[in-house]
Amino acid sequence: MLQLRSIFDVNAVQRFAPGDVVFRSGAQVKNVFLVCDGRTALLRLLPSGQQAMLQRAATGQIIAEASVYAHHYHCDCVAQEPTDLASMPRASFLNALRSDTELADAWAAYLAHGIQQARMRAEIRNLKTVAERLDAWTAEYGALPDKGQWQGLADEISVSREALYRELARRRSA
């Protein structure tokens, strides 16, 4: 990841407050974004009106990596906490990959890791109970996030906030 980070100007960052929109679904992909500090979420509105969280990108991660190969974004990107983002033109990013095989290999490894994480999230969402989903999530990612971020966790494991809160209360009382 350090190799990918090296092509971004991390001294020229844009600051986003919690809730700020980085880009919207349907917007043309012009830039590639690196999270220098903070966290963002990729959200897609479902026909039911609910939102699906497709990615949580934290410090050191690239946002919406699949969009590097798309003309338009397929989701919204929202800052979840104070977040600093470095960006570079999509065309420059692609040119850097074409001209540097080590960088291209680092990018391929980064994408492969993202696929592994997506598969894990899908497996967690396929578990039947909130308890099973929460156990699998903590086994994979560690400790629970801070209380103010539990809504994001509920979205990530595809349960209602209320169901997650009930399960957490049950665990505290057990």
Image: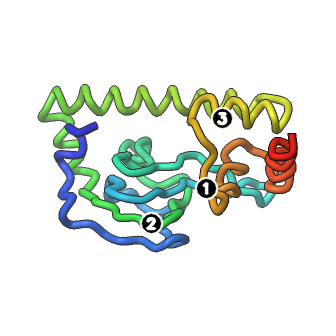
N-term mark: 3 or 1: 3
- The residue that disc 2 covers is 22
| Residue assigned mark 1 | 146
Residue highlighted by disc 3: 137
Residue at 63% across / 29% down in the picture?
139
What residue is drawn where x is 79% and y is 55%? 161
Spot the residue most to the left: 99
Say which amino acid is labelled 1.
Asp
Counting every numbered tag in the picture gives: 3
**Callout 2: SS:** strand
Q: Which of marks 1 and 2 is nearer the N terminus?
A: 2
Q: Do the residues labelled 2 and 3 touch (CB within 8 Å)?
A: no
Q: Which image quarter: residue 170? A: top right
> Is 99 on the left-hand or right-hand side of 120?
left
Q: Does residue 116 appear left or right of residue 46 in this picture?
A: left
Q: Which of marks 2 and 3 is nearer the N terminus?
A: 2
Residue sitting nearer the eye, 108 or 159: 159
Q: Position of residue 15 (x, y in %)?
A: 36, 71
Left or right of residue 17: residue 43: right
Which callout, 1 or 2, points to the residue nearer the camera? 1
Tell me the CA gap for discs 2 and 3. 27 Å
Residue at 49% x, 29% y: name it.
115
Instruction: Give the image location of residue 102, x and y in percent.
Output: 17, 27
Residue 44, located in which quarter of the rendered image?
bottom right
- The residue positioned 84% from the left and 44% from the top of the image is 167
Position of residue 109 measured from the top left corner of the image (x, y, whole percent): 34, 26
